[in-house]
Image (cartoon, helix red, strand yellow):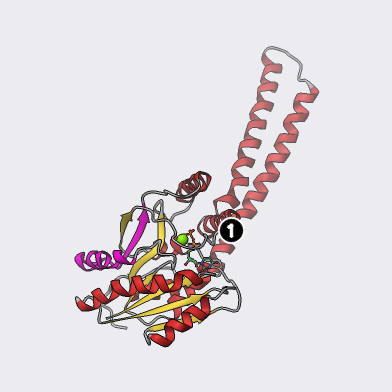
């Protein structure tokens, strides 16, 4: 059983070798203990402007198990992960950051869990602390998980990382998803395979800086939400309903007041009610459009309608 280790890298020249040394120790143990028969590293250079590619090429010369892919420019971590999944050959595949925030020493434990439970196809990781991260960033991250879990039908664990060990089946299902704007944490949940989450304490990046600016992260979180929920498109309909319902009730109230108590209807009150009513109807119209656009959006992703776990029908 071959293990593929996929490593997206963007301006990480000082991290390549330390990562390789540490990860190799972990996988050598795995090989000695016959958990895997062999391993390969696949580094994906995501348009680095420093010596990242040169470092990777050095490794590739020393070690025939090191492979690489290099992009023309920075396409983002999602693109790098996808390229890795599409080009690796392993029956087991793991995705890791090169900054050693995803500790390779966890791999043996991950394999143990994967092999211990019947039907388990994936061991993912989540960090239970966010030590060393700016407060505001942690707060936004927590809000993001709350929001996306409330308004979409995929359940994403708080603190979930991209670091995971999976079987070939999972990889193939992910590759069947052809959508362009990808949010992998959601896609893995969408694919639906039984997954165990291994919790660990956050490890701070040893060298270099994070490649995610606050703004980049914010845009990525919007990508995540809009990739898995059409609820924002439907909000207008809700607002529209509330608005027109409120104004109709207010109008009724004035008319009844006139009929029972005899207070004359004031012109401006009716005027404001009609403005709200019209505004509400327009919002409702937008919301209805949103419904259809949401449907188009979902269709345009062309996700498979289902993923089969098992069957006795022969292909
Ligand atoms: N990365 C990438 N392309 C990007 C941004 C990041 O390939 O556009 C890689 C980066 O080199 C690292 C991993 O993705 O291996 C995680 O990035 P980082 O450590 O900066 O993110 P953080 O851990 O701060 O969330
Ligand atoms: Mg990192």
Number of marks? 1
Residue 48 picture location, percent across and down:
57, 73
| Residue extent of the magenta highlight | 104-127
Which residue sits at x=33%, y=54%?
A: 200
Report whether residue 173 is seen.
no
What x and y, as percent, mark residue 207? Answer: 47, 63
Magenta-drawn stretch contains 105: yes
Whether residue 73 is situated above or below residue 283 in the rendered picture: below
Which quadrant of the rendered structure holds the N terminus? bottom left
Q: Is residue 184 left or right of residue 94?
A: right
Circle 1: element type: helix
Occupied quadrant, residue 60: bottom left
Q: In this view of the protein, which residue sits in the foreground, 145 or 59?
A: 59
Would you identify the image quadrant in which residue 51 lies? bottom right
Q: Residue 64, percent across and down?
A: 38, 87
Q: Which residue is mark 1?
A: 216
- Give left or right: position of 3 versus 9: left
Whether residue 40 is visible, yes or no, is: yes
**Quadrant location, the C terminus:** bottom left
- Seen as rendered, the residue at the extreme top is 261
The answer to whether residue 210 is above or below residue 300 is above
| Residue under the point 60% across and 55% down | 215
Considering every residue shown, the one lying at the far right of the view is: 267
Q: In percent of the image, x 59 and y 63: which residue is there?
A: 296
Q: Residue at x 24, y 74 (%)?
A: 29
Residue 116: x percent and y percent?
A: 19, 65
Report whether the residue tagged 1 is closer than 8 Å to ligand 1: yes
Residue 222 lies in quadrant:
bottom right
């Amino acid at each position: 059983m071959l293990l593929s280790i996929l490593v997206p890298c963007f301006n990480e020249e000082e991290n390549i070798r330390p990562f390789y040394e540490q990860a190799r120790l972990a996988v050598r143990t795995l090989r000695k203990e016959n958990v895997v028969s062999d391993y390969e590293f696949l580094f994906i250079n995501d348009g680095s402007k420093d010596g990242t590619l040169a470092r990777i090429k050095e490794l590739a010369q020393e070690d025939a198990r090191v492979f690489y892919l290099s992009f023309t420019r920075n396409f983002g971590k999602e693109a790098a992960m996808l390229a890795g999944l599409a080009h690796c050959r392993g029956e087991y595949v793991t995705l890791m950051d090169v900054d050693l925030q995803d500790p390779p020493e966890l791999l043996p434990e991950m394999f143990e869990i994967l092999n211990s439970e019947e039907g388990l196809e994936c061991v993912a990781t989540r960090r239970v602390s966010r030590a060393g991260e700016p407060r505001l960033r942690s707060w936004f991250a927590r809000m993001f998980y709350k929001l996306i879990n409330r308004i979409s039908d995929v359940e994403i664990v708080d603190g979930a990382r991209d670091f995971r060990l999976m079987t070939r089946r999972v990889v193939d299902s992910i590759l069947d998803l052809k959508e362009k704007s990808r949010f992998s944490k959601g896609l893995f949940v969408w694919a639906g395979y039984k997954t165990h989450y291994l919790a660990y304490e956050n490890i701070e990046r040893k060298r270099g800086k994070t490649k995610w600016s606050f703004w980049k992260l914010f845009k990525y979180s919007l990508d995540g939400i809009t990739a898995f929920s059409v609820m924002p498109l439907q909000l207008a309909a809700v607002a529209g309903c509330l608005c027109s319902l409120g104004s109709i009730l207010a109008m009724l109230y004035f008319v009844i007041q006139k009929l029972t108590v005899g207070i004359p209807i004031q012109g401006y009150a009716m005027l404001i009610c009609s403005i709200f009513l019209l505004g509400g109807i327009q919002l409702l119209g937008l919301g209805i459009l949103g419904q259809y656009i949401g449907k188009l959006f979902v269709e345009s992703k062309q996700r498979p309608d289902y993923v089969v776990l098992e069957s006795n029908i022969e292909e």
